[in-house]
Amino acid sequence: MKQRTPSYIQLLFLLFVLTMQTACQQEEDDNNGITEKVNVGDAIPDFILTDADGKTVSASSLSGQVYILSFFDTGCRDCQKEFPVLQQIYDKYQSDVVLLNVPRSQSASEISQYWQASGLSMPVYMPKDKDLYYKFASRGIPRCYIVDSKGVVQAVFTDAPIADYGTLDAILQDLLKDGAAQEDDTVKLSVRLRVPSAAGSTGIDFFQNEYIVSHLELFFFDSSTKKLVNKFVIEELSQDKEPYFTEYDITYLMKTLKIQVGVYNIFAVANYDKIPDNITSQDEFLELTDNVTYEEGIVPNMPQSGPVMTSRATSMLAVDLKPWSNKDFYLTIDVERVMAKVQIGTVQNYFELKHDGKKYADIHLTNYKLVNLNSEYYLFQHKAEMSALGGKPIFVMPQNFEEYNYGNREYVIDPLFYKKVALVADAEKFRNYYKSWYGAFTTDNFASIPASGNYGNAYILENTAFKSSQKNGFSPGIIFKAAVSPVSVYIYDTKTRTLVEETRQEYWSHTIYLYDYKFYGSIQAVNVAAGLSLDELATYTDVQLKAYGIKKCNFNMGVYETYYTYWIQHRTDNTDAMGAMCYGVVRNNFYRINITGVSGIGDSEIVPEIMRDNYSSSNINN
């Protein structure tokens, strides 16, 4: 009988069946050449997984907990044999042992379909890092790790042998017994997180989301070795309805944490999720959490998830964690915003400009923009000893974490500020630190000033340029935009060769000039009034006109515009000197600037002027 040749479709089907039957065999063959990266007795590498609800779990957060970490693929035959065994383990130990089933490359929907068809109920966790699998082995599934409460791998199963119920059950029984016997080696932490108000005192305006903590990371470093012992990622915090510390706006409570007895340096970071997962030491942690960037140095609106907040670097050093009468160890951590808050408002909508009791113009402040604000910041404060406030200080990063000391020349500072010692000739260097730099000012992206009695809010990274540099024009400041409404403008009548007072705006020129408290419609009119001989066809800058006591305003978008510069400065007892804020980081501070008066008009353009010790801040009063 003549044998039939298989069709193309049949060959494809046979090839598919053979592939399915040999998939795990290929894995077994691969295992022969595997170089194990994690073996029995090793500390488990840190990892971050998410469950079906989006909650995260990591090796650090599982400290004190026995758990199983299993890598699988639903198309692998050996994995399919292992699933019922793990399901049995889960059914028996789910209250005592955490089971982490992690797919090698499959999607959640693919796994869900297989789980439903197979009647499985054990949880599945998706890896945050796609390369997580390769932290444990170069290849090969199934792969199952049994980890004790100290984070040490006690057993590893692959496809030779596949984990069986009896073996897993015996291992877990022993580990749970050992964990109970070693209970004295761990301490339970009952953590309270306190968040102060915008200024740490009452009577100050604040918004609810200014002190919301939606995400918290706690880092525990061994105080002696500076090695990372635990990292806890906490996303479930509840507010204490009756906080013991009433001077704080809000106190958060969280689930009880468990950690080995020891002496720790503890750091808290709230509402920030960009710290790398692979840090191992305190020095590495501090280096990686420093030099963080806000591009403009300003946050116009506080995010609903809450601001970035951290504990003070010195507040939780050498904390001795140990059980006390078999009770929880109560740990209170204070955090504060890394940004200061500024409120800007006016006592009235319009200000009159008068001379000798006679009004010559109205000023309406309409917009503002903050300038010379840091574009980079450090999450944790540093301390340095300054040499006569002039030379480079003694500073070794990251050891300089000490308390602020008012009694000497030690300040809590931003280490970047020591790079900001350039002269005004080196101003280009500063553009690396100030995205909204005064010398590169643009007239876009202004915020509106609210109506009188109200305040606009901004959250800023304060300027920390060296004192001498701030005197050269690098102090933090605010540019105010205002509309000028003259009572009248004097027009030069070419027929009569005299000046005519005109109150109708439609007859005013595009540029008007203020001289001796009167506005003029042209340079020619100013020449007649002042006895000058300026070129009537030339275009003069503000600086050039200032030499003659003249100021100008340009017509734009229906109004005559002028700009005022206000320097934000802290003063010392000597009012001619710049105060401590100009070279100290004052985070979580609260500033309120309320405009009470305006004298004269400002500038038609923004031109940086060198700031001296006796610099007159601006024509804005507050």
Image (cartoon, rainbow, N blue to C red):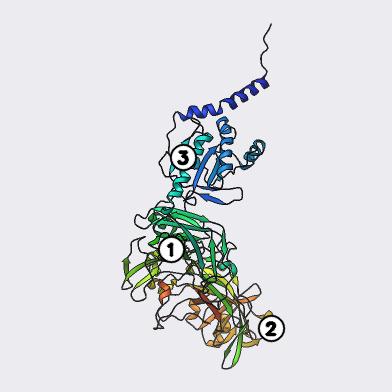
* Circle 1 SS class: loop
Residue receiving disc 1 = 380
* Circle 2 SS class: loop
Instruction: Choose between 56 and 381: the one closer to the eye.
Output: 56
Q: Give the CA separation, mark 3 to mark 2.
A: 82 Å
- Residue 484 in the image: state x and y as whole percent: 61, 80
Q: Dot 1: within a 10 Å radius of its alpha carbon, few (fewer than 14), some, or many (20 or more) residues?
A: many
Compare marks 1 and 3 and give the one earlier in the sequence.
3
Quarter assignment of residue 84: top right
Q: Which mark is residue 136?
A: 3
558 to the left or right of 201: right
> Between tags 1 and 3, which lies in front?
3
Instruction: Inspect this view and state whether residue 510 appears.
Output: no
Quarter assignment of residue 404: bottom left
Residue receiving disc 2 = 504
Q: Tag 2: residue type? A: Arg
What is the quadrant of the N terminus in the image?
top right
- Residue 572 in the image: state x and y as whole percent: 40, 81
Quarter assignment of residue 468: bottom left
Instruction: Choose between 487 and 204: the one closer to the eye.
Output: 204
Compare marks 3 and 2 and give the one earlier in the sequence.
3
Q: Tag 3: residue type? A: Phe
329 vs 539: above or below:
above
Q: Dot 3: within a 10 Å radius of its alpha carbon, few (fewer than 14), some, or many (20 or more) residues?
A: some
